[in-house]
Image (cartoon, rainbow, N blue to C red):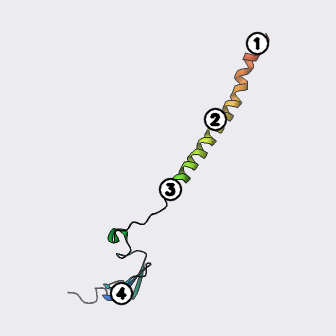
Amino acid sequence: MKTDIHPNYTNTTFSCACGAEFTAGSTLGKDEFKTEICSQCHPFYTGKQKLIDSSGQVEKFRAKMEKAKAAKSTKTEEMNAEEMPAEEAPAEEKAAE
């Protein structure tokens, strides 16, 4: 085995956002490592499901689509309104004759 090519293997304290702490061997080179989730708070390991409000996202998407649809129909109506007088003018002239 070659010397001086392997990283230092030290004990590192891992601390989770839920407050759990455990010590494990690591080559990170840090004495402490912070993480957001661990086996004590992850739903897969605990069997408890955390509810995330995703209904707000769906409603936001639907509102965005309705707004886009309304803008498209308004634009279409404006384009049709600009074209209509040119098309209606000969019909009005025929009625006057």
Residue to which mark 2 is pinned: 76
Q: Is residue 21 above or below residue 69?
A: below
- In-front residue for pair 45/78: 45
Q: Which quadrant would residue 21 be assigned to in this image?
A: bottom left
Q: Position of residue 4 (x, y in %)?
A: 28, 89
Q: Nearer the viewer, mark 3 or mark 1?
A: 3
* Element under disc 3: helix
Residue to which mark 3 is pinned: 55
- Check the picture and name the quadrant holding the C terminus: top right
Q: Amino acid at mark 1?
A: Ala
Q: Nearer the viewer, mark 2 or mark 3?
A: 3
* Marker disc for residue 95: 1
Q: Amino acid at mark 4?
A: Thr
**Is 11 on the left-hand or right-hand side of 85?**
left
Residues under labels 3 and 1: Cα distance?
Answer: 57 Å
Contact between labelled residues 2 and 4, with CB atoms less than 8 Å apart: no
Q: Amino acid at mark 3?
A: Ser
Residues under labels 4 and 2: Cα distance?
Answer: 64 Å
Residues under labels 2 and 1: Cα distance?
Answer: 28 Å
Q: Earlier in the sequence, mark 2 or mark 3?
A: 3
Residues under labels 3 and 4: Cα distance?
Answer: 40 Å
Residue to which mark 4 is pinned: 12
